């Protein structure tokens, strides 16, 4: 009899635990949610995050706050996110930002495999390589020829993460000498490019397109497999004869270590219930919200499996070409 009572008590306790977990699941969020971004205001990630934040705030009945934490190759934002230890704080940005960090830094203050728990992919960002219009460079071929003719005389910059890594890995693989200009906030770089303070910039197409339309910079190529709908006259890197520059950047939202699968799936479902207003990204591509079902993320993997996530050149390949922070 005592044994039966004990078993019944255990069963009741387990049932209450499940009920309590389900109730907690339904209650999310109980307070303000924070999206921490590795880029500054007006970046492609920032624009996308704010569109989702507005929609989710209305759906959840709680504020969704976008926090811009640029700098340090994305480490400023990642340290703030990991250090929060809070399931109401999420990291919002391109998976390439942290996928390349193990190849750029000997040690990291967090574990990219386990401290970022993928929830959903939320954007496909078109990357572009641009030069000032005053340089009169009209193709990647002409850019390569100019850098080769003026070794160490030209400056270049890239958005932290895969844009920077890919650009300088490419120059290194070509045996070209160009000076890397680091930016805390890459959103300052387009105006510097237009004024020829830097000569090459790799960042999202959405960021440079206004200056391109104003006739102040020249977008030489996009790194996507297909031409961007918002810039149909700009060739892809493969079309330009440089397939090694092909990369399609996936932006995602990530939860902290220990976030339950049920909570991740619930949040991802809310992202998928987006309003018609956010059916396209700032680059002109559709926003393909996809649920991430894996509990961990390999260093070289994108946020979620998609038809447009891989690059012909992996971070490991480029790491062999560029370990130092300045191409020389």
Image (cartoon, helix red, strand yellow):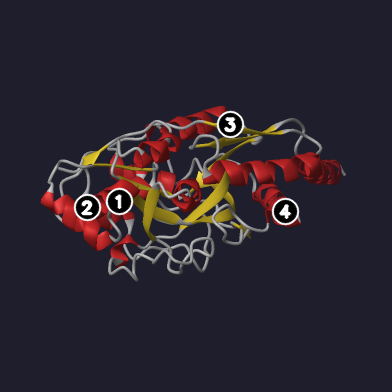
Residue underneath mark 3? 67
Residue underneath mark 4? 277
Residue underneath mark 2? 171
Sequence-wise first label, 3 or 2? 3
Q: CA distance from mark 1 to mark 2?
A: 6 Å
Sequence-wise first label, 4 or 2? 2
Q: CA distance from mark 4 to mark 3?
A: 22 Å
Q: Residues within 10 Å of mark 4 (few under 14, many from 20)?
A: few
**Mark carried by residue 167:** 1
SS for dot 4: helix
When asked about the image quadrant of residue 178, the answer is: top left
Q: Is residue 64 above or below residue 207?
A: above
Sequence-wise first label, 4 or 3? 3
* Viewer-proximal residue among 73 and 177: 177
- x then y, percent, for residue 165: 32, 48
Residue located 34% across and 71% down the image? 239
SS for dot 1: helix
* Viewer-proximal residue among 68 and 91: 68
Left or right of 201 in this view: 151 = left
When asked about the image quadrant of residue 1, the answer is: top right
SS for dot 2: helix
Left or right of 117 in this view: 170 = left
């Amino acid at each position: 009899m005592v044994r039966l009572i004990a078993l019944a008590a255990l069963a009741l306790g387990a049932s209450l635990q499940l009920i309590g977990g389900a109730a907690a699941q339904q209650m999310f969020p109980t307070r303000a949610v924070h999206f921490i971004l590795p880029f500054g205001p007006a970046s492609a990630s920032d624009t996308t995050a704010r569109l989702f934040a507005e929609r989710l705030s209305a759906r959840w009945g709680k504020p969704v706050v976008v926090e811009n934490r640029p700098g340090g190759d994305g480490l400023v934002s990642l340290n703030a996110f990991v250090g929060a230890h809070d399931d109401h704080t999420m990291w919002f940005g391109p998976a390439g930002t942290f996928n390349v960090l193990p190849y750029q830094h000997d040690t990291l203050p967090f574990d990219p495999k386990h401290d970022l728990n993928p929830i959903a992919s939320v954007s496909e960002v078109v990357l572009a390589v641009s030069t000032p219009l005053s340089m009169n460079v009209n193709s990647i071929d002409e850019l390569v020829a100019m850098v080769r003719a003026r070794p160490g005389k030209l400056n270049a910059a890239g958005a932290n993460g895969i844009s920077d890594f890919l650009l300088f890995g490419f120059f290194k693989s070509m045996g070209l000498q160009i000076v890397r200009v680091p930016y805390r906030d890459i959103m300052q770089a387009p105006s510097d490019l237009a004024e020829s303070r830097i000569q090459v910039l790799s960042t999202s197409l959405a960021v440079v397109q206004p200056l391109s339309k104003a006739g102040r910079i020249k977008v030489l190529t996009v790194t996507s497999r297909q031409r961007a709908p918002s810039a149909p006259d700009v060739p892809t890197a493969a079309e330009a004869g440089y397939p090694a520059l092909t990369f399609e950047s996936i932006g995602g939202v990530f939860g902290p270590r220990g976030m339950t699968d049920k909570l991740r799936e619930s949040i991802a479902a809310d992202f998928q219930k987006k309003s018609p207003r956010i059916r396209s990204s700032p680059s002109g591509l559709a926003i393909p919200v996809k649920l991430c079902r894996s509990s961990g993320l390999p260093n070289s993997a994108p946020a979620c499996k998609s038809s447009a996530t891989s690059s012909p050149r992996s971070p490991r390949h480029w790491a062999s070409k560029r370990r130092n922070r300045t191409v020389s």
